[in-house]
Amino acid sequence: MRVLIDDMEWENLERELLEEERRDLLERARKEAAKDRRFIRDILVDGKPLQEEAFLSMKGGLEVKFVTISVKELVTESLEETQRYMPALLDGINLVADRLEEKYDKDALTLLQQITEGIGWVVKVLHNSLLLLGITDADLGDGELGTTRERLLQVLEGALSPLEEGKFFELAYRLREEVEPALSDLRRYVDELLAMASGEVQ
């Protein structure tokens, strides 16, 4: 089996590695990519892209190609996606609030769960971006990203508490008046991190 990382054949690949489990091969490829501060983004087997789970479970194949991405590219792409997602997330908060005020329905609660998960995803992207860029809150803008992030999570937790008691009007009010502004405050840090990542030389 031929193994490539990007367009370079893995020439120093030990013979026994070719006979290892796919999981071991992937792990070794990740370590090899990490030497150049890169991450594996795609796995191609005989030219066909595979999800990681499919790659780990499949047998055979004449060529495996691991396509990598740099830290800068990974962070930039993640933050660009977050930047595009934020307006929809903010609109979603207001939509849920409107629907909860009109009438209680399961669809509104399903959407609320998606909003909650979306906020968690945004917070995680910001956290991971800081780690990958090797910077701290203090290096970014006013240095208040951590405080803003924690305030958002506290406000979200507090806003959801009326849900247990069926107080849907109060939940709607707190989503609109507390959660939406707290999430809006986080947007500038996404913009600042993106500017920093895309302007940074790796």
Image: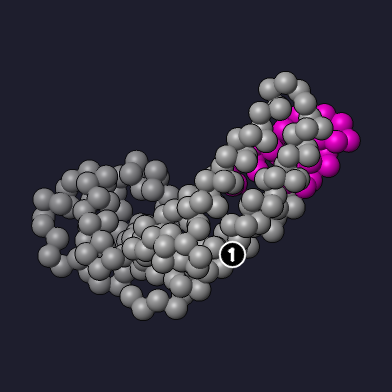
Q: Nearer the viewer, residue 163 or 86?
A: 163
Q: Does the segment drawn in magenta span residue 38?
A: no
- The amino acid type of the residue labelled 1 equals Arg
Secondary structure of the residue carrying numbered label 1: helix
Q: Which residues are magenta?
A: 93-119
Q: Is residue 38 above or below residue 126?
A: below
Which residue is disc 1 drawn over?
188
> Of helix, strand and loop, which mostly describes the magenta segment?
helix
**Residue 163 visible in image:** yes
Relative side of 178 to 36, left or right:
right
> Residue 109: x and y, percent?
72, 33
Q: Residue at x 67, y 45 (%)?
A: 179
> Residue 184: x and y, percent?
66, 56
Looking at the image, the residue that sits furthest to the top is 165
**Residue 107 visible in image:** no
Q: Residue at x 54, y 63 (%)?
A: 189
Relative side of 61 to 123, left or right:
left
> Residue 160: x and y, percent?
66, 32
Q: Does the segment drawn in magenta span residue 104?
A: yes
Image quarter hosting the C terminus: bottom left
Relative side of 90 to 194, left or right:
right
Q: Residue at x 61, y 61 (%)?
A: 187
Q: Is residue 100 above or below residue 20?
A: above
Q: Quadrant of residue 200?
A: bottom left
Q: Nearer the viewer, residue 60 or 86?
A: 86
